[in-house]
Image (tube, rainbow, N blue to C red):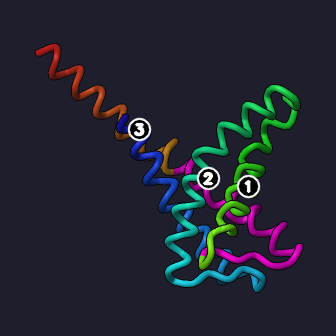
Amino acid sequence: MIRFLLQLVSQLVLGAIALIVIHFTLPGVTLTFEGFFIALGVFTLAHVVLGPFALSVAQRYAAPLTGGVGLVATLLALWVATWSPGGVQIVGLESWVLAPLIVWTITALGGWIIMGLIVDRILKKRAAAKLVRSVK
């Protein structure tokens, strides 16, 4: 349970960073202050829901493409986030191609660093301390 909560917080933080980056780097991406929070919530929820769905579809119909599932889930999550009035607006082919790539790169690398290097170490130390306490 704690791992899921840490993963959710990680996804929120990395999603926020990614949305800010695409807002300032891509001219076709518009994001208001209120829209940022709407887009972040919608993006995170869509990513959590669509990620496993896209993975199961890829595994069933196109197993060699499972590596690109995160990118597809990111594209779908951004697309869903654009549905909300006042959320994120993405205009132009260049922005639609680059935005998912940038967001996916930030969330994938950040998730790997945060979850793989930091959280796993914390959870392992916690489990070891719990084991030591149970032996005493």
Q: Secondary structure at mark 2?
A: helix
Q: Which residue is mark 3?
A: 3
Q: Sort mark 3 into few (<14), some (14-19) or many (20+) by Cα contacts within 10 Å.
A: few
Residue type (three-letter) at the residue carrying disc 1: Leu
- In percent of width and height, residue 97 lies at 84, 66
Q: Amino acid at mark 2?
A: Ala
Q: CA distance from mark 1 to mark 2?
A: 8 Å
Q: Nearer the viewer, mark 2 or mark 3?
A: 2
Instruction: Judge from the rendering whether residue 86 lies leftward or rightward of residue 78; answer left or right.
Output: left
Judged from the image, the secondary structure of the residue bearing numbered disc 3 is helix
The picture places residue 81, in percent across and down from the top left corner, at 65, 65
Which labelled disc corresponds to residue 76? Answer: 1
Quadrant of image for the N terminus: top left
In this view, the residue in front, 124 or 69, is 69
What residue range appears in magenta? 87-113
Q: Is residue 119 above or below residue 83?
A: above
Marks 3 & 1, CB-CB < 8 Å contact = no
Which one is closest to the eye, mark 3 or mark 1?
1
Q: Residue 18 occupies which quadrant of the picture?
A: bottom right
The main secondary structure of the magenta stretch is helix
Q: Which mark is residue 46?
A: 2
Q: Earlier in the sequence, mark 2 or mark 3?
A: 3
- Report if residue 18 lies within the magenta region: no
Where is residue 96 drawn, in percent x and y?
82, 69
